[in-house]
Image: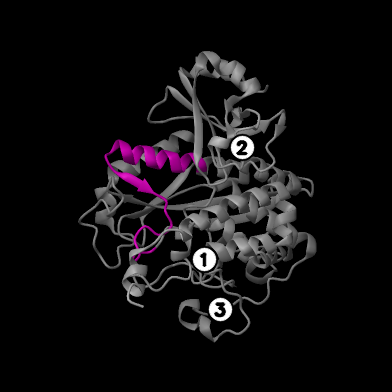
Amino acid sequence: MATDLAKVAKDRKIKYFLISYVDLFGALRAKLVPARAIGEMQKAGAGFAGFATWLDMSPADSDMFAVPDPDSLIQLPWKPEVGWLASDIVMDGKPVAHGPRHILKQQVAAAAAKGLRMKSGVECEFFLVTPDGRAVADTQDTHAKPCYDQGALMRRYDIITEICDAMIALGWEPYQNDHEDANGQFEMNWTYADALVTADRHVFFKYMVKAIAEKHGLRATFMPKPFIDLTGSGCHAHVSVWDRAGKRNLFHDPKGELGLSQMAYHFLGGVLNSAEGLCALFNPTVNSYKRINAPRTTSGATWSPNAITYGGNNRTHMVRIPDADRFEFRLMDGAANPYLLQAGLLAAGLDGVETRRDPGPRRDIDMYTQGHTLEGIRRLPANLLDALRAFAADDVLRARLGASFGDSYLKLKQDEWARFARHLTEWERETTLDC
């Protein structure tokens, strides 16, 4: 073991460790382990009953163990006596084939085998709401166009700066925080890193934001569309592919179109090719489809994609080219599982590179006002069921992410859709009772 967690605990005065993993639905699960027991836990892992979480297991399955990754250690800035650890889940001595972190590590390994390394950053949007989740917490935050509202931002100074200070202390290099396009909505940005590092940080960021908001008597939510008339919460990903050493950005080519290499466009072609199926991972809830394909919000625009297109520095497309070295993928929302977000991009992008997929022409139009004039473009799924069917039919994603993952994910998500379909809404009563 390169890092002795027992020694780290003694040196840093850590009393307890949260040994954590993320299930298929993106829920963070953990056990709180005293530092005196971390040595054994580092070797064998903390035991869990896998059936008790969303992992498609049964009560008859063996114990599942979460083996912590020492490199992921984060000492809670607001409670430094506790250390958080991302973990890899194993059963009967083997990795759980459909474990989200394992799925991402497989894609990272597949890229490394080709001398490639994906780096990414995420833009995590969230709302600060009342504890019951029914309203925006700031009653003064009522402007029709509240984006970048300095007053609303500063009224949440204590929360935002506590989170930002924590990221500074952790070495994430945060560089800006803002009030977003919806009332009560915020975004915080930190520097990009290797895909697995970004995914681990993304998992912890969501936990940290919720914990600090709760500490201040509020509730933070990454729900894609908590308020129907307000802009939803996305989780845009900025992506580039580098050489094995991480020194040279292989997407950058000064002679290429908009400064991007042929490899970059092939990677993009792979993502566009599997876009419908990727929605099942990037937009994984019933609520997600109230964000994409949505009508105009009170601010004047949803800022969400409505078709499978890409453009230059143009935020009305599913993919934006903001600079000459990366893509911004704008499809993902706040509910996306951080590991599956990165794994889906890498799996589809690698397929594009290997098969030299053509992304088609760039569209330099406003998709919100002119998109209907384009012929032959593909539209995004209208609901979760359509996305799951697209994922089931996508041979590329199923092959690259693995049959075990695909079958388990589809089974659990289709059951979720069935539970939603059994829900009787007030709208149905109002429109159908007298039919």
Quadrant where the image shows the N terminus: top right
* Separation (CA) of disc 1 from disc 2: 29 Å
Residue depth check, mark 3 versus mark 2: number of the one nearer the observer: 2
**Bounds of the magenta span?**
203-231
Residue 410 in the image, given as x and y percentages of width and height? 62, 54
Is 233 rendered above or below residue 303? above
Q: Earlier in the sequence, mark 3 or mark 1?
A: 3
User: Which amino acid is tagged 3?
Assistant: Asp
User: Which amino acid is tagged 1?
Assistant: Asn
Residue 68 in the image, given as x and y percentages of width and height? 60, 28
- Mark 1 and mark 2 in contact? Answer it, CB < 8 Å: no
Residue 157 in the image, given as x and y percentages of width and height? 28, 45
Question: Dot 3: within a 10 Å radius of its alpha carbon, few (fewer than 14), some, or many (20 or more) residues?
Answer: some
* Separation (CA) of disc 3 from disc 2: 51 Å
Q: Earlier in the sequence, mark 1 or mark 2?
A: 2
Is residue 63 located in the magenta-colored stretch of the structure? no
Residue at label 2?
58
User: Which amino acid is tagged 2?
Assistant: Ser
Is 97 rendered above or below residue 248? above
Residue depth check, mark 1 versus mark 2: number of the one nearer the observer: 2
* Separation (CA) of disc 3 from disc 1: 27 Å
Q: Secondary structure at mark 2?
A: loop
Residue 51 in the image, given as x and y percentages of width and height? 57, 36
Give the residue at x 45% y 24%. 82
Left or right: residue 93 compared with residue 389: right
Residue at label 3?
364
Quadrant where the image shows the C terminus: bottom left
Residue at label 1?
383
* Nearer the observer, 98 or 366: 98
Question: Dot 2: within a 10 Å radius of its alpha carbon, few (fewer than 14), some, or many (20 or more) residues?
Answer: few
